[in-house]
Amino acid sequence: MKWFGRKSGRDESRPVLARGSGVALGEWPRTYEAQVRDGYCLNAVAQRAVKLVSEGVASAPVEASAPELAALVGARSGGRPFLEGVAAQLLLHGNAFVAVMRDAEGGVDGLFALRPERVRVELDAGGWPAAYRYAVGERVARFSADPVRPEVIHLRSFNPVDDHYGLGCLPAAAGAVAIHDAAARWHKALLDNAARPSGALVFDPGDGSVLSPDQWARLKDEMEGAFQGAANAGRPMLLEGGLKWQALSLSPADMDFVGTKAAAAREIALAFGVPPMLLGLPGDSTHANYREANRALWRLSVLPMAGAILAGIAEALRGWWPDASLMVDLDRVPALAEERAMLWKSVSAADWLSDDEKRELVRP
Protein backbone atom coordinates (compact mmCIF):
# COMPACT_ATOMS: atom_id res chain seq x y z
CA MET A 1 0.00 0.00 0.00
CA LYS A 2 1.20 3.49 -0.76
CA TRP A 3 1.60 5.98 2.06
CA PHE A 4 1.42 9.59 0.87
CA GLY A 5 2.91 8.75 -2.48
CA ARG A 6 5.44 6.18 -1.27
CA LYS A 7 5.37 2.50 -0.44
CA SER A 8 5.68 1.27 3.09
CA GLY A 9 8.42 -1.26 3.70
CA ARG A 10 6.49 -3.10 6.40
CA ASP A 11 3.02 -4.11 7.44
CA GLU A 12 1.25 -0.88 8.48
CA SER A 13 -0.68 -2.74 11.18
CA ARG A 14 2.43 -3.39 13.27
CA PRO A 15 4.02 -0.54 15.22
CA VAL A 16 7.76 -0.13 15.57
CA LEU A 17 8.60 -1.32 19.08
CA ALA A 18 12.30 -1.87 19.52
CA ARG A 19 14.30 -0.70 16.54
CA GLY A 20 17.66 0.80 17.24
CA SER A 21 17.86 -0.54 20.78
CA GLY A 22 21.37 -1.90 20.23
CA VAL A 23 20.45 -5.24 21.83
CA ALA A 24 20.84 -8.52 19.97
CA LEU A 25 17.69 -10.36 19.04
CA GLY A 26 18.53 -13.21 21.36
CA GLU A 27 18.88 -10.86 24.34
CA TRP A 28 15.75 -8.69 24.05
CA PRO A 29 12.26 -9.93 23.15
CA ARG A 30 10.69 -8.42 20.07
CA THR A 31 7.00 -8.56 20.96
CA TYR A 32 5.59 -5.74 23.04
CA GLU A 33 4.04 -8.05 25.64
CA ALA A 34 7.37 -9.82 26.20
CA GLN A 35 9.18 -6.49 26.36
CA VAL A 36 6.81 -5.24 29.04
CA ARG A 37 7.30 -8.41 31.10
CA ASP A 38 11.10 -8.22 30.94
CA GLY A 39 11.59 -4.46 30.87
CA TYR A 40 8.80 -3.30 33.19
CA CYS A 41 7.27 -6.11 35.25
CA LEU A 42 10.64 -7.63 36.23
CA ASN A 43 12.75 -4.47 36.47
CA ALA A 44 12.32 -2.36 39.60
CA VAL A 45 13.94 0.78 38.18
CA ALA A 46 11.80 0.92 35.02
CA GLN A 47 8.64 0.08 36.93
CA ARG A 48 9.21 2.81 39.51
CA ALA A 49 10.15 5.37 36.84
CA VAL A 50 6.95 4.71 34.88
CA LYS A 51 4.84 4.88 38.04
CA LEU A 52 6.37 8.21 39.09
CA VAL A 53 5.44 9.84 35.78
CA SER A 54 2.04 8.16 35.26
CA GLU A 55 0.89 8.70 38.86
CA GLY A 56 2.02 12.31 38.59
CA VAL A 57 -0.09 12.78 35.46
CA ALA A 58 -3.10 11.24 37.23
CA SER A 59 -2.67 13.49 40.27
CA ALA A 60 -2.33 16.71 38.26
CA PRO A 61 -5.25 19.11 39.00
CA VAL A 62 -7.31 19.56 35.84
CA GLU A 63 -9.03 22.76 34.74
CA ALA A 64 -11.92 21.97 32.37
CA SER A 65 -14.30 24.11 30.33
CA ALA A 66 -17.22 21.92 31.45
CA PRO A 67 -17.81 19.79 34.57
CA GLU A 68 -18.64 16.79 32.36
CA LEU A 69 -15.17 16.93 30.80
CA ALA A 70 -13.48 17.04 34.19
CA ALA A 71 -15.54 14.02 35.29
CA LEU A 72 -14.54 12.06 32.17
CA VAL A 73 -10.78 12.46 32.63
CA GLY A 74 -11.02 12.17 36.41
CA ALA A 75 -12.79 8.80 36.31
CA ARG A 76 -11.28 5.54 37.50
CA SER A 77 -11.02 2.38 35.42
CA GLY A 78 -10.49 -0.95 37.17
CA GLY A 79 -9.76 0.86 40.41
CA ARG A 80 -7.00 2.95 38.87
CA PRO A 81 -7.21 6.56 37.59
CA PHE A 82 -7.98 6.72 33.89
CA LEU A 83 -5.15 9.18 33.17
CA GLU A 84 -2.59 6.97 34.92
CA GLY A 85 -3.24 4.10 32.52
CA VAL A 86 -3.11 6.39 29.47
CA ALA A 87 0.18 7.94 30.60
CA ALA A 88 1.76 4.53 31.28
CA GLN A 89 0.74 3.28 27.83
CA LEU A 90 2.27 6.32 26.17
CA LEU A 91 5.52 5.83 28.08
CA LEU A 92 5.84 2.11 27.38
CA HIS A 93 4.18 1.65 23.98
CA GLY A 94 4.18 5.16 22.57
CA ASN A 95 0.46 4.88 21.75
CA ALA A 96 -2.73 5.22 23.79
CA PHE A 97 -6.08 4.30 22.25
CA VAL A 98 -9.07 5.67 24.19
CA ALA A 99 -12.50 4.28 23.35
CA VAL A 100 -15.33 6.82 23.53
CA MET A 101 -18.27 5.09 25.21
CA ARG A 102 -21.71 6.32 24.03
CA ASP A 103 -25.00 6.52 25.91
CA ALA A 104 -28.45 5.88 24.47
CA GLU A 105 -28.78 9.47 23.19
CA GLY A 106 -25.40 9.41 21.42
CA GLY A 107 -23.58 11.44 24.05
CA VAL A 108 -20.30 10.53 25.73
CA ASP A 109 -20.86 8.18 28.64
CA GLY A 110 -17.22 7.51 29.49
CA LEU A 111 -13.66 6.99 28.28
CA PHE A 112 -11.87 3.63 28.35
CA ALA A 113 -8.17 3.01 27.62
CA LEU A 114 -7.68 0.04 25.28
CA ARG A 115 -4.65 -2.23 25.37
CA PRO A 116 -2.41 -0.62 22.70
CA GLU A 117 -0.84 -3.84 21.46
CA ARG A 118 -4.31 -5.12 20.54
CA VAL A 119 -5.16 -2.14 18.32
CA ARG A 120 -4.28 -1.83 14.64
CA VAL A 121 -4.80 1.21 12.45
CA GLU A 122 -6.67 0.51 9.20
CA LEU A 123 -5.76 2.87 6.37
CA ASP A 124 -7.78 4.08 3.41
CA ALA A 125 -6.55 4.21 -0.18
CA GLY A 126 -4.78 7.50 0.46
CA GLY A 127 -2.92 6.22 3.51
CA TRP A 128 -5.02 8.03 6.12
CA PRO A 129 -6.49 6.26 9.18
CA ALA A 130 -9.98 4.98 8.35
CA ALA A 131 -10.71 2.78 11.38
CA TYR A 132 -9.19 1.08 14.41
CA ARG A 133 -9.35 -2.69 14.76
CA TYR A 134 -9.29 -4.05 18.33
CA ALA A 135 -8.61 -7.80 18.57
CA VAL A 136 -8.86 -9.98 21.68
CA GLY A 137 -8.21 -13.57 20.67
CA GLU A 138 -10.59 -14.36 17.83
CA ARG A 139 -12.98 -11.51 18.70
CA VAL A 140 -12.46 -8.34 16.68
CA ALA A 141 -14.17 -4.96 17.12
CA ARG A 142 -13.91 -2.17 14.55
CA PHE A 143 -14.07 1.49 15.60
CA SER A 144 -14.64 4.37 13.24
CA ALA A 145 -12.03 7.11 12.84
CA ASP A 146 -14.63 9.82 12.25
CA PRO A 147 -12.77 13.15 12.55
CA VAL A 148 -15.83 14.90 14.08
CA ARG A 149 -17.09 12.31 16.57
CA PRO A 150 -14.44 9.56 16.72
CA GLU A 151 -15.09 6.24 18.41
CA VAL A 152 -11.40 5.99 19.36
CA ILE A 153 -9.03 8.78 20.39
CA HIS A 154 -5.49 7.95 19.27
CA LEU A 155 -2.79 9.64 21.36
CA ARG A 156 0.78 8.99 20.29
CA SER A 157 4.29 10.19 20.93
CA PHE A 158 6.62 11.36 18.20
CA ASN A 159 8.02 8.63 15.96
CA PRO A 160 10.41 9.71 13.17
CA VAL A 161 10.22 6.34 11.38
CA ASP A 162 6.46 5.69 11.38
CA ASP A 163 3.52 7.70 10.08
CA HIS A 164 0.76 6.19 12.21
CA TYR A 165 2.26 4.77 15.42
CA GLY A 166 4.15 6.49 18.21
CA LEU A 167 7.44 5.36 19.72
CA GLY A 168 7.58 4.49 23.41
CA CYS A 169 10.44 4.87 25.87
CA LEU A 170 10.80 1.14 26.55
CA PRO A 171 12.87 0.42 23.39
CA ALA A 172 15.30 3.21 24.27
CA ALA A 173 15.81 1.65 27.69
CA ALA A 174 16.22 -1.87 26.31
CA GLY A 175 20.02 -1.97 26.40
CA ALA A 176 20.22 -0.55 29.92
CA VAL A 177 17.50 -2.93 31.14
CA ALA A 178 19.39 -5.90 29.69
CA ILE A 179 22.61 -4.79 31.43
CA HIS A 180 20.80 -4.12 34.71
CA ASP A 181 19.09 -7.52 34.65
CA ALA A 182 22.37 -9.29 33.79
CA ALA A 183 24.10 -7.54 36.70
CA ALA A 184 21.30 -8.62 39.05
CA ARG A 185 21.66 -12.24 37.91
CA TRP A 186 25.42 -12.01 38.38
CA HIS A 187 25.03 -10.77 41.95
CA LYS A 188 22.46 -13.49 42.67
CA ALA A 189 24.89 -16.14 41.42
CA LEU A 190 27.65 -14.62 43.55
CA LEU A 191 25.45 -14.88 46.65
CA ASP A 192 24.56 -18.45 45.78
CA ASN A 193 28.28 -19.24 45.80
CA ALA A 194 28.95 -17.97 49.34
CA ALA A 195 29.11 -14.30 48.27
CA ARG A 196 32.78 -14.51 47.36
CA PRO A 197 34.86 -15.41 44.27
CA SER A 198 34.98 -19.07 43.47
CA GLY A 199 38.14 -20.99 44.07
CA ALA A 200 39.66 -24.15 42.62
CA LEU A 201 40.28 -27.58 44.09
CA VAL A 202 43.67 -28.72 42.83
CA PHE A 203 44.32 -32.50 42.76
CA ASP A 204 48.03 -33.24 43.10
CA PRO A 205 48.68 -36.77 44.47
CA GLY A 206 52.34 -36.72 43.41
CA ASP A 207 52.22 -40.00 41.48
CA GLY A 208 50.61 -38.63 38.30
CA SER A 209 47.25 -40.35 38.84
CA VAL A 210 43.91 -38.68 38.11
CA LEU A 211 40.47 -38.80 39.69
CA SER A 212 38.20 -41.61 38.54
CA PRO A 213 34.72 -40.70 37.19
CA ASP A 214 33.11 -41.92 40.43
CA GLN A 215 35.51 -39.88 42.55
CA TRP A 216 34.89 -36.81 40.37
CA ALA A 217 31.10 -37.16 40.64
CA ARG A 218 31.25 -37.64 44.43
CA LEU A 219 33.51 -34.59 44.87
CA LYS A 220 31.20 -32.44 42.74
CA ASP A 221 28.09 -33.51 44.68
CA GLU A 222 29.79 -32.80 48.01
CA MET A 223 30.87 -29.35 46.85
CA GLU A 224 27.37 -28.39 45.63
CA GLY A 225 25.53 -29.86 48.61
CA ALA A 226 27.78 -29.00 51.52
CA PHE A 227 29.70 -25.86 50.64
CA GLN A 228 27.76 -23.75 48.11
CA GLY A 229 24.92 -21.36 48.90
CA ALA A 230 24.29 -18.68 51.52
CA ALA A 231 23.44 -21.25 54.22
CA ASN A 232 26.94 -22.75 53.92
CA ALA A 233 28.85 -19.46 53.87
CA GLY A 234 32.06 -19.70 55.90
CA ARG A 235 31.74 -23.45 56.50
CA PRO A 236 35.18 -25.09 56.85
CA MET A 237 36.20 -27.53 54.15
CA LEU A 238 37.81 -30.90 54.84
CA LEU A 239 40.09 -32.06 52.02
CA GLU A 240 41.60 -35.47 51.41
CA GLY A 241 43.72 -37.46 49.00
CA GLY A 242 46.02 -34.82 47.55
CA LEU A 243 43.38 -32.09 47.24
CA LYS A 244 44.23 -28.50 48.08
CA TRP A 245 42.17 -25.30 47.84
CA GLN A 246 43.39 -22.42 45.74
CA ALA A 247 41.35 -19.21 46.15
CA LEU A 248 40.62 -16.97 43.18
CA SER A 249 40.05 -13.23 43.38
CA LEU A 250 37.83 -10.90 41.42
CA SER A 251 39.41 -9.00 38.57
CA PRO A 252 39.05 -5.19 38.48
CA ALA A 253 36.42 -5.60 35.74
CA ASP A 254 34.39 -7.95 37.94
CA MET A 255 34.67 -5.62 40.92
CA ASP A 256 33.21 -2.79 38.78
CA PHE A 257 29.98 -4.71 38.20
CA VAL A 258 28.27 -2.69 40.93
CA GLY A 259 29.17 0.53 39.13
CA THR A 260 27.96 -0.92 35.83
CA LYS A 261 24.59 -1.80 37.34
CA ALA A 262 24.21 1.68 38.83
CA ALA A 263 25.08 3.29 35.49
CA ALA A 264 22.48 1.12 33.75
CA ALA A 265 19.87 2.11 36.34
CA ARG A 266 20.58 5.80 35.73
CA GLU A 267 20.22 5.26 31.98
CA ILE A 268 16.83 3.59 32.51
CA ALA A 269 15.71 6.57 34.58
CA LEU A 270 16.96 8.89 31.83
CA ALA A 271 14.96 7.03 29.17
CA PHE A 272 11.73 7.57 31.11
CA GLY A 273 12.53 11.18 32.06
CA VAL A 274 12.93 10.69 35.80
CA PRO A 275 15.75 12.31 37.85
CA PRO A 276 17.88 9.47 39.30
CA MET A 277 17.72 11.04 42.77
CA LEU A 278 13.97 10.32 42.98
CA LEU A 279 14.69 6.61 42.43
CA GLY A 280 17.31 6.48 45.16
CA LEU A 281 20.15 6.08 42.65
CA PRO A 282 23.60 7.43 43.58
CA GLY A 283 25.82 9.09 41.04
CA ASP A 284 25.57 11.94 38.64
CA SER A 285 22.50 13.78 39.93
CA THR A 286 22.92 17.55 39.71
CA HIS A 287 19.91 18.40 41.88
CA ALA A 288 20.61 19.96 45.25
CA ASN A 289 17.69 18.24 46.98
CA TYR A 290 14.59 16.15 46.46
CA ARG A 291 12.37 19.22 46.15
CA GLU A 292 14.39 20.48 43.19
CA ALA A 293 14.43 17.01 41.61
CA ASN A 294 10.68 16.68 42.05
CA ARG A 295 10.16 20.07 40.42
CA ALA A 296 12.33 18.95 37.50
CA LEU A 297 10.26 15.78 37.16
CA TRP A 298 7.06 17.79 36.90
CA ARG A 299 8.44 20.45 34.59
CA LEU A 300 10.28 18.12 32.19
CA SER A 301 8.13 14.98 32.19
CA VAL A 302 4.79 15.08 34.01
CA LEU A 303 3.42 18.43 32.79
CA PRO A 304 4.36 17.98 29.09
CA MET A 305 2.75 14.53 29.02
CA ALA A 306 -0.33 15.63 30.96
CA GLY A 307 -0.73 18.64 28.67
CA ALA A 308 -0.46 16.50 25.52
CA ILE A 309 -2.99 13.94 26.82
CA LEU A 310 -5.53 16.53 27.94
CA ALA A 311 -5.20 18.59 24.76
CA GLY A 312 -5.64 15.50 22.57
CA ILE A 313 -8.75 14.36 24.45
CA ALA A 314 -10.27 17.85 24.41
CA GLU A 315 -9.70 18.21 20.67
CA ALA A 316 -11.31 14.83 19.96
CA LEU A 317 -14.38 15.65 22.09
CA ARG A 318 -15.20 18.94 20.39
CA GLY A 319 -17.83 17.14 18.33
CA TRP A 320 -19.84 16.98 21.56
CA TRP A 321 -18.43 20.07 23.35
CA PRO A 322 -17.44 22.67 20.69
CA ASP A 323 -15.49 24.76 23.19
CA ALA A 324 -13.90 21.79 24.97
CA SER A 325 -10.76 22.70 26.87
CA LEU A 326 -8.67 20.64 29.29
CA MET A 327 -5.43 21.76 30.91
CA VAL A 328 -3.42 21.41 34.10
CA ASP A 329 -4.09 24.08 36.72
CA LEU A 330 -0.52 25.05 37.58
CA ASP A 331 -1.61 27.08 40.61
CA ARG A 332 -2.76 23.86 42.31
CA VAL A 333 0.31 21.69 41.59
CA PRO A 334 2.07 21.17 44.96
CA ALA A 335 5.48 20.67 43.35
CA LEU A 336 5.25 24.12 41.73
CA ALA A 337 3.79 26.00 44.70
CA GLU A 338 7.01 27.81 45.56
CA GLU A 339 7.70 28.67 41.94
CA ARG A 340 4.17 30.00 41.35
CA ALA A 341 4.29 32.03 44.58
CA MET A 342 7.46 33.76 43.41
CA LEU A 343 5.83 34.51 40.05
CA TRP A 344 2.74 35.97 41.70
CA LYS A 345 4.90 38.10 44.00
CA SER A 346 7.01 39.51 41.17
CA VAL A 347 3.99 40.23 38.96
CA SER A 348 2.06 41.86 41.80
CA ALA A 349 4.97 44.20 42.44
CA ALA A 350 5.05 45.36 38.80
CA ASP A 351 3.03 48.56 39.16
CA TRP A 352 3.56 49.52 35.51
CA LEU A 353 1.47 46.54 34.32
CA SER A 354 -2.29 46.63 34.00
CA ASP A 355 -4.48 44.02 35.66
CA ASP A 356 -5.13 42.35 32.29
CA GLU A 357 -1.40 42.16 31.54
CA LYS A 358 -0.76 40.63 34.97
CA ARG A 359 -3.45 38.01 34.40
CA GLU A 360 -1.86 37.14 31.07
CA LEU A 361 1.58 36.68 32.67
CA VAL A 362 0.38 34.33 35.41
CA ARG A 363 -1.94 32.35 33.17
CA PRO A 364 -0.88 28.65 32.96
Image (tube, grey):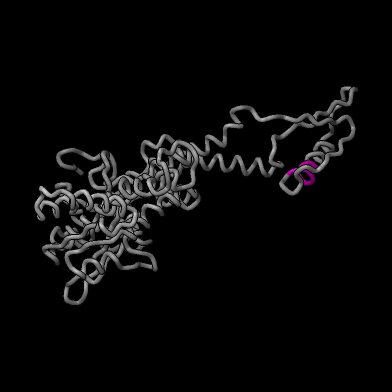
Check the image and name the residue furthest to the bottom: 104
Q: Is residue 360 visible?
A: yes
Q: Is residue 126 left or right of residue 270?
A: left
Instruction: Name the residue nearer the viewer: 282 or 179.
Output: 282
Q: Which percent across, then down, holds residue 355?
A: 11, 55
Instruction: Report the predominant secondary structure element of the magenta stretch.
Output: helix
Residue 249: quadrant of the picture: top right
Q: Nearer the viewer, residue 171 or 56?
A: 56
Residue at x 61% of width, y 31% of height: 254
**Image quarter in which the N terminus is found:** top left
Q: Nearer the viewer, residue 11 or 331?
A: 331
Q: Quadrant of residue 248?
A: top right
Q: Residue at x 23, y 44 (%)?
A: 163
How far from the left and from the top, in percent, is residue 171? 39, 42
The magenta segment is 222-228
Quick check: 296 left or right of 35?
left
Give yes or no for residue 116 being in the magenta stretch.
Answer: no
Residue 85 location in percent, x, y?
35, 59
